[in-house]
Amino acid sequence: MENSKFEIRNSKSARKNGNCGPLVRYHSTMPPLAKLSEHQLTEQRSRFHAAAVPVATLDEVKQAVAERKRVYQTARHHCWACRVRDEHGQLVEQARDDGEVGRPGMKLLELLRQH
């Protein structure tokens, strides 16, 4: 992926009032992933499984999440975030918390934006 610049306007008051919130600028310089990367961590008897999956479309993201849910069926939450380009070249960002508290999906998305 080439270096790209995009803007996001988002705030609690903007969503409530339907207005554009403060402007946040991000520069995307993260190269695409070449292969699957996984890591596991145990913290206070809780197990965390992380995976960075190379995908190109939102459909591939959803397929990858479905596969992770199949592999880790006993997991209570499957939090994820993605940044992909749509068919028009526009950056699409999505994040899901899957019922977990603390908004981990948005935190994951913020990490993707920074790298």
Image (cartoon, helix red, strand yellow):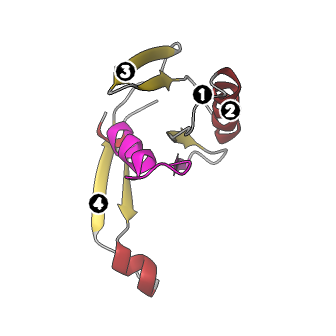
Q: Amino acid at mark 4?
A: Val
Residue denoted by label 2: 60
In the image, residue 7 lies in the stretch drawn in magenta: no
SS assignment at label 1: loop
SS assignment at label 2: helix
Q: Which span of residues is magenta-colored?
A: 90-112
Residue denoted by label 1: 55
With 75 as the anchor, is 42 left or right in this view? left
Looking at the image, tell me whether mark 1 or mark 4 is earlier in sequence order.
Answer: 4
Q: CA distance from mark 2 to mark 4?
A: 27 Å
With 44 as the anchor, is 99 left or right in this view? right
Q: Which mark is residue 24?
A: 4
Q: CA distance from mark 3 to mark 1?
A: 27 Å
Looking at the image, tell me whether mark 3 or mark 4 is earlier in sequence order.
Answer: 4
Q: Amino acid at mark 1?
A: Val
Looking at the image, tell me whether mark 2 or mark 4 is earlier in sequence order.
Answer: 4
Is residue 43 shown to the viewer in this render?
A: yes
Residue at (47%, 23%) from the top-left corner? 49
Looking at the image, tell me whether mark 2 or mark 3 is earlier in sequence order.
Answer: 3
Residue denoted by label 3: 42
Mark 4 closeness class: few <14, some 14–19, many ≥20 residues within 10 Å: few
